């Protein structure tokens, strides 16, 4: 187990922070469907290969589809410096399998040149793009249903305000 979770106090603080973030997400004044849709889009964008622009993509998706930003950003920040190597290695492997390419990629580390790096990059670029998009969509489907189930369970419809907008709150 990670050293981070060995200390009971640290583990309880982590759990409390996660509960607070979930409560903040559930307290947004949107329907469970909209909350689930925003979370699913966040998962797709978070696993996408567009590192460095994922935040801007999430802001664009939020404004274009009129979705709340907070659930989108939680999904986008799935990929962080700790998780990126694992996620991208896995998605590249998935892309290699989907494209029917040789999944046992080897690289000659004793003879590293700029040309050999570009050749390796050309070989893995298409599987990387295909794999990240495929895994992103596959992850978005359960994300939608899990968030929808949680939001449906803990959110309650509170009627319509004076402007005709539906109001939601936490049970």
Image (cartoon, rainbow, N blue to C red):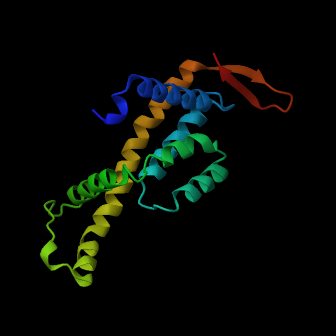
Instruction: Locate residue 121: give its quadrant.
Output: bottom left
157 or 8: which is nearer to us?
Answer: 8
Name the spot of residue 129 as percent of width and height, x first.
35, 62
Residue sitting farthest toward the top: 171
Residue 7 seen in this snapshot: yes
Q: Please give the name of the residue rendered at 58% of the width and 59% of the height, measured from the top-left corner.
A: 56
Instruction: Indicate the quadrant containing the N terminus: top left, top right, bottom left or bottom right.
Output: top left
Q: Please give the name of the residue rendered at 52% of the width and 30% of the height, measured from the top-left corner.
A: 17
Instruction: Locate residue 89: give its quadrant.
Output: bottom left
Q: Is residue 26 above or below residue 90?
A: above
Q: Is residue 9 above or below residue 69?
A: above
> Could you tell me how many numbered marks the image carries?
0
14 or 97: which is nearer to us?
Answer: 14
Residue sitting farthest toward the right: 162
Q: Please give the name of the residue rendered at 24% of the width and 84% of the height, measured from the top-left corner.
A: 115
Q: Please give the name of the residue rendered at 51% of the width and 46% of the height, measured from the top-left corner.
A: 41
Instruction: Answer left or right for 30 relative to 48.
Output: right
Name the spot of residue 105 as percent of width and height, x first.
16, 64
Q: Is residue 63 above or below residue 96?
A: above
Instruction: Indicate the quadrant containing the C terminus: top left, top right, bottom left or bottom right.
Output: top right
Name the spot of residue 44 as percent of width and height, x first.
45, 49
Instruction: Answer left or right for 30 relative to 120.
Output: right
Name the spot of residue 75 as percent of width and height, x first.
49, 44
Instruction: Answer left or right for 11 relative to 162.
Output: left
61 or 100: which is nearer to us?
Answer: 61
Q: Is residue 54 above or below residue 73?
A: below
Residue 108 seen in this snapshot: no
């Amino acid at each position: 187990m990670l050293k981070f979770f060995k200390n009971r106090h640290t583990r309880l603080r982590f759990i409390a922070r996660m509960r607070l973030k979930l409560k903040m997400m559930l307290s947004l004044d949107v329907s469970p469907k909209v909350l689930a849709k925003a979370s699913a889009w966040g998962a797709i964008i978070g696993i996408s290969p567009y590192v460095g622009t994922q935040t801007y993509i999430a802001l664009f998706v939020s404004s274009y589809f009129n979705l709340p930003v907070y659930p989108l950003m939680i999904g986008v920040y799935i990929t962080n410096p700790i998780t990126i190597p694992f996620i991208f290695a896995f998605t590249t492997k998935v892309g290699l399998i989907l494209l029917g390419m040789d999944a046992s990629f080897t690289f000659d580390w004793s003879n590293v040149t700029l040309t050999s790096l570009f050749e390796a990059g050309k070989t893995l670029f298409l599987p990387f793009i295909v794999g990240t998009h495929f895994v992103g969509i596959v992850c978005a489907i359960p994300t939608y249903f899990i968030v929808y189930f949680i939001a449906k369970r803990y959110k309650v419809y509170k009627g319509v305000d004076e402007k005709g907008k539906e109001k939601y709150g936490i049970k």
